[in-house]
Amino acid sequence: MKGNVLLLALGQAVMMSGTVLLFATAALLGSRLASDKALATLPLALQMGASVATTIPASLLMERIGRRNGFVLASTVAVAGAVLATYAIVGRSFELFCLATALIGVFTGFGNYFRFAAVDAATLEFRARAVSYVLAGGVAAAVIGPNLARWGSQLLPGVEFAGGYVALAALYVLCFLLMFRLDIPRAAAVDGGDGRPLIVILRQPAVPVAMIAGALGYGMMALIMTAAPLAMHSYAHRYDDTAFVIEWHVLGMFVPSFVTGRLIHRFGVWRVMLAGALLMAGCVTVNLLGTSVRHFWLALLCLGVGWNFLFIGATSLLTVGYRRNEQAKVQALNDFVVFGVSTLAVLSAGALQYRFGWRAVNLGVIPCIAIVLAALGWLRRTQQRRGGVRDLATTGAQG
């Protein structure tokens, strides 16, 4: 069990390194390569869109061929995407760069199931911590991702950021090799049948709340994180400052993962998710108070920790709402919603930033925070009516 979790955490580190590199550079590259500056975030949106389009077939495919084979297949696509991205940057082709980010998005669509694969490999009481430890693999991405372009600059001198994608291709090859060592039984081998209809599963309060919190939490993070490099550039901050801010943001996203599972076990998933929503509110407040590097740093740090609490909490909450033989369809629907919302957020980030400014980006997040808080409040009241609030993250699937 621990060996599988370690391999999945390493896979998560590779996947998130690529994602962070894209968030740190793709909008800037899009701005340089595209004829219309409003399309600057289109490569990121395509990466997210490909991820969304892949979520359902990826889940169903891995139900048939297993987690290991699915992740190995996705890694080969990722290598092709990173190589094509390098070629596109050198050749100054916006269209090819968009195609490359879409291929990386296919890998991400599979890789987002690393956390659910950890659930498959874990005992009931270890689930929340297994998810948390896998996401902790992103700590390495916090260092690797923002610095890939800087470290790889000597590989292709004179072509900014291209060397980083060469290095990313090498990381994807490593991921390909790591995934061969996974040993996780297929769900079909554990429980037969298709389980309950989705409509029945969705009637459990924990499931829709987990989807709402996961989707809006990820969407808010993606919107602000995508717009932040553009905003810092517009305020004449150096790219080194931008990389510093993104690095700390990603540290905020993943360093808490070492303890988030334990926090959920001790205080309950509801309180951890509530703390995440309040940290998102703190991020918006800081961003509205100023635009110095210090303001960006503190705000995106709060954003990262808030995302961590919401996303791990939502994932843990979701897993109590389905049985093992129902996981493929429930996980597919969840990730389709989560990353569909994120795609819309990324696509709108460039237009919002360029046409309305940084303040408008942050004001647009406030209604989302309110919806998450309302959903959590509804879950709390529902559980109280049923005889007290239980730690849903450590109970079995509901009937």
Image (cartoon, rainbow, N blue to C red):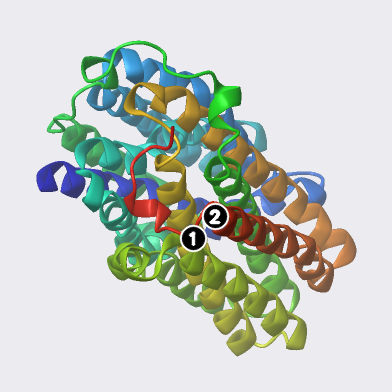
Q: On the image, numbered disc 1 is attached to which residue?
A: 388
Secondary structure under badge 2?
helix
| Marks 1 & 2, CB-CB < 8 Å contact | yes
On the picture, is 138 further left or further right than 103? Answer: left
Locate the N terminus and report the quarter of the image it occupies.
top left
In the figure, residue 381 lies in which quadrant? bottom right
Q: Nearer the viewer, residue 397 or 20?
A: 397
Locate the C terminus and report the quarter of the image it occupies.
top left
| Crowding near the residue tagged with mark 1, few <14, some 14–19, many ≥20 C-alpha atoms within 10 Å | few
- Which residue ends up furthest to the right in the rendered image? 355
On the picture, is 168 further left or further right than 146? Answer: left
Q: Is residue 141 visible?
A: yes
* Kind of residue indicated by mark 1: Gly
Instruction: Please provide percent x and percent y for residue 62.
Output: 34, 20
Q: Nearer the viewer, residue 93 or 158?
A: 93
Of the numbered discs 1 and 2, the one sitting upstream in the chain is: 2
Instruction: Please provide percent x and percent y for residue 10.
Output: 23, 49
The disc placed on residue 383 is 2
